[in-house]
Amino acid sequence: MQRNVLQLFYLASAILFVLGLRGLSHPKTARRGMFLAELGMLLAIIGTLLHHEIIDYRWIVLGLVIGTAIGAPLAIWIPMTAVPQRTALSHSFGALAAALIGISEYLRHGAALGSGKVGLIGIEVMLGSLTFTGSLMAAGKLQGLIRGFPVTYRGQNVSNISLLAGMLALIVALMFQPAASTLFFALLALAFLFGVLLILPIGAADMPVVIALLNSYGGLTDAAMGFMLDNKIQIITGSLDGSSGFILSILMCRAMNRSMTNVLFGAFGKVQEQPAALAAAAGKSIRQVSIDEAAEILGTTRSIVFVPGYGMAVSQAQHRVRELADALKGKGAAIRYGIHAVAGRMPGHMNVLLAEANVPYDELYDMDQINSYFPETDVVVVVGANDVVNPAAKRVRASPIFGMPILEVERARIVIVCKRSLAPGFAGIDNELYYNDNTLMLFGDAKDTMVKLATALKQ
Amino acid sequence: MIDIGLIGDLYVFVLAGFLGYQVISRVSPLLHTPLMSATNAISGISLVGSLVVAGAGYDKISTLLGFFAVVASTINVVGGFLITDRILKMFRRASPATVGGPGPEHPTVSR
């Protein structure tokens, strides 16, 4: 196909991608938007298949078939709780593709590329390789194949920063010596290593930021590939993807009141000393309730807010939560869900799980919307959330989560906390909410508790 | 070292970044997970570069690397769009009768 005609195909795809992403501003238009994006992708692929340089379709068809055979089942059958690791895994695939093409370009043209192009390839291969191994690490941690605990050692930040400097130096050296393939492969090896080392010190609770950040790196890799091949559709898509990941990671950081540097280099949740103010709370006692007592309180209330956390995802309790909510609605209560941006393991994780359990999206409220409503709320039921409802974030200056915006559940009349035990959350800190006078502790597995509560209500 | 083509590409990159910022900022927080899977799917556009390398018959190594790149990007395109649709299908509105009582404003949904 003529190069100019192909570019028109790509232009149409770019427009359709932007329209598709715009559709996501509302659940009502989202599916139509994605249809447009799919159409854009189809156009780009068809246009490319007619590219004049393509002479042999055997490997292409085989690749498309195998890719579909792996991608489709991965999308259709995985449980919604596993969406974070699937997302991380797909970041790694995208980065791998870009890195492979970068390698092939370098091997094929070598020194003939000139220093500018070699510099671009260097950047592309570096970003692609580190995103590949970094995303694999993140997926491994999320899936539980690798321990989610942060791994730290002395001089970690210094060694990581010097590794980064080393890679940049190699790229510069390559620009002066484009023929020196040893430099190229050294860069490749360092980038693979760097991806692993970058994710090692990051704990499971920080995954929402990391996934978003890897998304952004993936986008930049794509854009770099576009620069290298002088292909505008890839530059546009990479840039869109990169800014999306960037915005999400900023939002996640803000929701934890932490800087990006702190997430990447802070090794959150590793060793936290118990702040003195909270240790005092340990002297206070908690008030425990039984299932029947809790059911009685819930059965006679008008407005109830559920606050889900990662604990709900772990015990797969979202369907049981919705069944309990249905039972309560039957008794005339208004039900809402308060969702913190970093509850769960990726941006929007809780929304997806609740939507899966048939909770209508107009019952889902984000933090700013629900916080002003807590004073008028009769009962808040906290299911598997901990740090995002810890009032220490507002009051205790010494607390590691001080300054983090939280769901102010303690302002409701009664707070019922469903929890396995008194063990601290991922930040490793005690929660003074549990010792408040209006807090009732309901110990047990989240799923179990929800089922028992619903049964008790029906009696 | 910096030619006109590269400058043109830079224009596109920067302007697309601004456009992306505007569009993505308006995405409802409800849909941040499908946003990620959708950008995953779209980033599978690296498929177009991979297709050429896999099919142009440059040499054995290029073809092989291109082939693996086609596999990896296809996983993202197919898997990304399928799971995005699967997620978006789950988001539904309540029938008006089931939403009871006065509540907070809901800008995310009413916008």
Image (spheres, coloured by chain):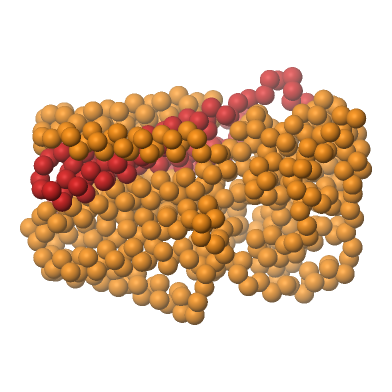
Chain colours: A orange, B red
A329 above or below A441?
A: above
Asked whether, in this view, residue A195 is left or right of residue A153, the answer is: left
Asked whether, in this view, residue A349 is left or right of residue B1, the answer is: right
Q: Position of residue A342 (x, y in %)?
A: 60, 51
A281 above or below A141?
A: below
Q: Position of residue B19 (x, y in %)?
A: 38, 40
A79 above or below A410?
A: above
Q: Position of residue A335 (x, y in %)?
A: 76, 33
Rendered residue at 87%/43% (across/down): A291
Asked whether, in this view, residue A239 is left or right of residue A87, the answer is: left
Asked whether, in this view, residue A40 is left or right of residue A396, the answer is: left
**Whether residue A11 can be seen here:** no
Q: Residue furthest left?
A: A112
Rendered residue at 79%/43% (across/down): A449
A115 above or below A75?
A: below
Closest to the observer, B56 or A413: B56
Rendered residue at 53%/52% (across/down): A143
Q: Position of residue B58 (x, y in %)?
A: 10, 45
On-image quarter of the N terminus of chain A: top left
Rendered residue at 27%/45% (across/down): B69
